[in-house]
Structure formats: C-alpha cells, structure tokens
Image: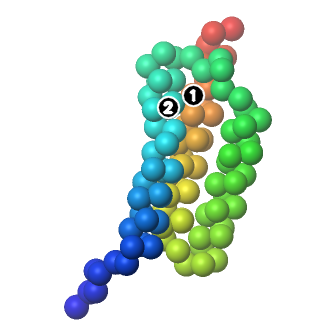
Amino acid sequence: MIDIQMDITQLIGIGASIGTGISLLPQLIKIIREKKAEQLSMGMMAVLLTGLILWIIYGVSKDDWIIILSNAVSLLLNVAIILLSIKYKKESH
C-alpha cells in the first residue's frame, strides 16, 4: 500500500513550487495576447534561467521531485517567454 500522508513541510514545498512554477504564466499570456515584449530584460532572464538550471541540478542531486518539477516548469515558461520575445521583436522591426 502506498503511504500518501504528507507532513506540513512537504505541503509548504508543494505550495511554493506551484506558486513559483506558474509565477510567469501571466507574463507569457500577456506576450501572447499583445504579440510584443519590448520591456523584457534579457539580462534578467539569463540570470533567472541560470538559477533555475542550478535549482534543477540541486533537486536532482537531492532526489527532490518538488524542486525538480517546479523549477522545470519555471524553466519551460521562461524559455517560452524568451522565444516569443525574440520572435515579436523581430516581427516589429
């Protein structure tokens, strides 16, 4: 039988990972709707991507699926934001 009982620390981790994972979803939706992203700082995005990759590596080393999953979702959202940003900047020129 699978034990699905979670302690408060795991619940906090899951809540934090959901919040972190979807934090840039509104930005992604805005870029898709407006088809522009002039205000996006690529420097900030590069630093954020580096941090997310390091978090994923850390999560793998700790075998912590909460850290891995939340940061992988964030990484995918950020990559989508960057790609759409580049696309819409090229289209506006």
Q: Which residue is mark 1?
A: 84
Rendered image quadrant of residue 37: top right
Question: Where residue 76 sits: x, y (%)?
Answer: 54, 47
The residue at the far left in this view is 1
- The reply to whether residue 86 is in sight is no
The residue at the far top in this view is 93
The residue at the far right in this view is 43
Tell me what residue is drawn at x 49 percent, y 31 percent. 28
- Image: 26 above or below 34: below
Rendered image quadrant of residue 11: bottom left
Question: Where residue 25 sits: x, y (%)?
Answer: 46, 37
- The reply to whether residue 79 is in sight is yes
Callout 2: SS: helix
Amino acid type at image mark 2: Leu
Question: Where residue 21 sits: x, y (%)?
Answer: 48, 50
Amino acid type at image mark 1: Leu
**Circles 1, 2 touching at the beta carbon (< 8 Å):** yes
Q: Which residue is mark 2?
A: 28
Question: Where residue 56 sits: x, y (%)?
Answer: 61, 63
Residue 84 relative to residue 45: left or right: left
**Between tags 1 and 2, which lies in front?**
2
Q: Earlier in the sequence, mark 1 or mark 2?
A: 2
Rendered image quadrant of residue 7: bottom left
Q: Quadrant of the N terminus?
A: bottom left
- Image: 45 above or below 19: above
Q: Quadrant of the C terminus?
A: top right
Marks 1 and 2, how far apart at CA: 8 Å
